[in-house]
């Protein structure tokens, strides 16, 4: 028994007319009548009192109507829940270097979530080299880093080229010093 037959049957019962039901379903009346006949043949029972105006159901028709409403409601609920579960199960795992939290990354993630609200986004802080390995092993789907890489197994896109400042304690050998502050530019 097809759900479509049940939808057609419910429409005929509720409209008490094949013509009105056909209009409600946006189909022609003769195919609707044939579908109801097919349903009656499949079940081996008559569902409507023939010749009665307005159209009335038989006892078997009333039984089917009550259960068809439940079945159709359950089918819609199952369809809706399955779609939601399918959307929730999709996860995008993003690797990133910690310093990008102060740059474009939060904005990129925000905009992506706006476009894909049902997608679960998982963030994992990793060094650029750890991201490369994780991408190859399938542990992350995308990575955001600062180091320039050259690996034929990984596709690279550059979002922004910005100079980054390095801060270190006074008189550190890691950065050049000027008047008590330690800053160095590198790109």
Image: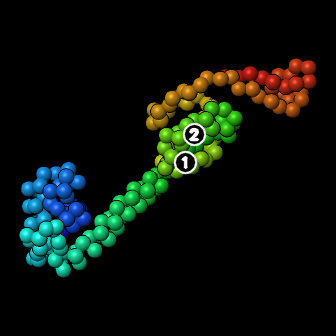
Q: Quadrant of residue 50?
A: bottom left
Circle 1 SS class: strand
Q: Nearer the viewer, residue 141 or 20?
A: 20
- Category of crowding for the residue at label 2, using alpha-carbon neighbours closer than 10 angstroms: few (below 14), some (14–19), many (at least 20): some
Looking at the rendered image, the quarter that the C terminus falls into is top right
Q: Residue at x 14, y 73 (%)?
A: 47
- Category of crowding for the residue at label 1, using alpha-carbon neighbours closer than 10 angstroms: few (below 14), some (14–19), many (at least 20): some
Looking at the rendered image, the quarter that the N terminus falls into is bottom left
Q: CA distance from mark 1 to mark 2?
A: 8 Å
- Of callouts 1 and 2, which one flags the residue occurring earlier in the amino acid sequence? 2
User: Relative to 174, does residue 12 appear above or below in the rendering?
Assistant: below
Is residue 99 shown to the viewer in this render?
yes
Q: Which mark is residue 160?
A: none
Residue 51 image position (x, y, % from top left) = 8, 70
Label 2: which residue?
109
Label 1: which residue?
121
- CB under 8 Å between discs 1 and 2: yes
Q: Nearer the viewer, residue 162 or 127?
A: 162
Q: Residue at x 66, y 32 (%)?
A: 103
User: Relative to 185, does residue 126 appear above or below in the rendering?
Assistant: below
Residue positioned most to the right: 180
Residue 38 image position (x, y, % from top left) = 10, 66
Residue 28 image position (x, y, % from top left) = 13, 51
Q: Residue at x 24, y 65 (%)?
A: 14
User: Relative to 136, does residue 5 appear above or below in the rendering?
Assistant: below
């Amino acid at each position: 028994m097809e759900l479509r037959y049940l939808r057609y049957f419910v429409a005929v019962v509720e409209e008490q007319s094949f013509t009105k039901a056909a209009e409600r379903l946006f189909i022609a009346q003769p195919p609707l009548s044939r579908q109801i006949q097919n349903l009656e043949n499949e079940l081996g029972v008559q569902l409507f009192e023939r010749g009665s105006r307005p159209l009335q159901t038989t006892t078997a028709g009333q039984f089917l109507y009550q259960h068809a409403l439940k079945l159709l409601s359950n089918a819609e609920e199952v369809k809706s829940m399955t779609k939601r579960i399918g959307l929730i199960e999709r996860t995008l795992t993003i690797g990133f270097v910690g310093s990008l939290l102060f740059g474009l990354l939060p904005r990129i993630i925000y905009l992506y979530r706006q476009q894909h609200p049902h997608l679960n986004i998982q963030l994992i802080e990793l060094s650029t080299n750890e991201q490369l390995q994780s991408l190859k092993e399938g542990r992350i789907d995308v990575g955001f880093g600062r180091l320039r890489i050259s690996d034929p197994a990984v596709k690279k896109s550059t979002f922004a080229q910005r100079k980054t400042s390095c801060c270190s304690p006074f008189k550190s050998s890691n950065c050049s010093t000027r008047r008590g502050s330690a800053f160095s530019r590198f790109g």
